[in-house]
Amino acid sequence: MYRLVQKFGGTSLADLDAIRHAALRVKEAFLDKQQAQADVKGLVVVSAMGDSTDRLVAQTQAYTSNCQQRDYDVVLASGEQVSSGLMALALCQQNIRACAMQGWQVPIYTDGNHSTARITDIPQKNIVAAWRSYDIIVVPGFQGISPDQHITTLGRGGSDTTAVALAAAVQADICDIYTDVDGIYTADPRVVPSARCLDQITYEEMLELASLGARVLHTRCVELAMARSIPVRLRPTTNNNEGTLLQQEGASMEQPAITGIALEDDEAKITLLGVQDRPGVAAQIFTPISEQHISVDMIVQNVSADKKTTDVTFTVAKKDLASCMKVIKDCPITYSALRTDANVAKVSVVGRGMRSHAGIASKLFATLAAHGINIQVISTSEIKISLLIDQSNGKAAVRHIHKAFIEQ
Ligand code: ASP
Ligand code: MG
């Protein structure tokens, strides 16, 4: 049996014509597979139409006092209920045996954390039973059911995660995620017009890029695909390009030094000058910050020249800057000056090839130096190097790095 999971994002389902078009894509893929293999069954996961979830969020905001998260989820999950029903109707009109099944009917079990629920289990029994009468089951993304039988939602962008979780539950042969981009690019094509769409990328690289600037896929969806080795293909809805396949690293995969470059400008830099250099100071700074649920990204501490004081620099999301400053001011440590800079950009290069290619960091630094771009903070992981630079240099830096590493 061939099991196909296809997911369509909101922009691919913006209106009734778009849903009809998406239904045609489902039909094409289904018939195509059926020619090669007799027994094909499909699951289609849908997001809410266009920006309807934004509108639902706005409606819930009319009643903020004593608002129950539970009822917020009742409202939010309705967008996908509509699109799943319409998709099933559109498929039936194409003579495909299709029906919609809501999250509670599948059931997609989640924990009870309303609005940020995590999927805990999807038994395949009801899906398999429904496949006896239907070829395609349409399932709303983003929703599930809590242990006490209430509707939950998975957090914005959560439909990608629903698709991969369903693919894992039915051991799908492929999970195709249809979207409004052609696939994963070497850099944002709006910044680098010569950026290439990648044929393939490893989960690990995608995870680094997904949590950086390239917000094409929900991070949790990539984590799940990696944990369960689900082949995920990101493909365009509007043309027949093959898109980008996410998979485990294979022996036949090429190993370029750098696979992709991401740019983020939503972080701010904080520097504490003249902090006492003694055990426990870093914990005194960062513990109260984490207690306020503020995530710290890059951290650098200098060696202390006089063995008494040192400087500590770190970055937080711009939206957290004000609350982070308040925490530091209330913190019982002494320092000589506190500086902040919100005009920074973080450029990150990602590539599994870093493990085998030497000299990537030095070439990267030399590339920026050649264009007079100053590096303020550097951080690295096994397959990623991130550089904090002045915001005004962000796009140019991405273009220079792309030229030096990817277009050579
Ligand atoms: N409709 C939800 C949202 O807009 C979930 C999704 O589209 O993935 O966030
Ligand atoms: Mg999405």
Image (cartoon, helix red, strand yellow):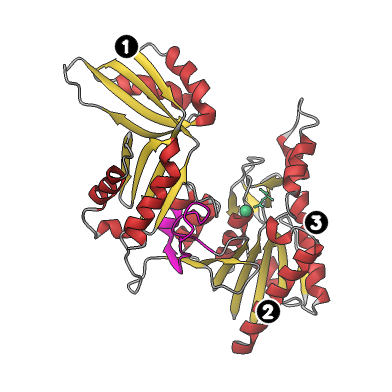
The answer to whether 129 is drawn above or below residue 155 in the figure is below
Q: Is residue 201 magenta?
A: yes
Magenta residues (range) = 183-207
Q: Does dot 3 land on a helix, a strand or a loop? A: helix
CA gap between label 1 and label 2 equals 67 Å
Residue hosting label 1: 336
Res. 141 image quadrant: bottom right
Compare residues 121 and 276 and report the one nearer the observer. Answer: 276
Q: Residue at x 63, y 60 (%)?
A: 180
Label placed on residue 44: none
Question: Quick one: label 2 or label 3, which is nearer the N terminus?
Answer: 2
Q: Does dot 1 land on a helix, a strand or a loop? A: loop
Amino acid type of the residue that numbered disc 3 sits on in the rendered structure: Val
Judged by depth in the image, the label closer to the viewer, 1 or 3, is: 1
The answer to whether 267 is drawn above or below residue 152 in the figure is above
Question: Quick one: label 1 or label 2, which is nearer the N terminus?
Answer: 2
Q: Position of 75 compared to 26: left or right?
A: right
Residue hosting label 2: 28
CA gap between label 1 and label 3 equals 58 Å
Amino acid type of the residue that numbered disc 2 sits on in the rendered structure: Glu
Q: Position of 264 compared to 53: left or right?
A: left
Question: Quick one: label 1 or label 3, which is nearer the N terminus?
Answer: 3
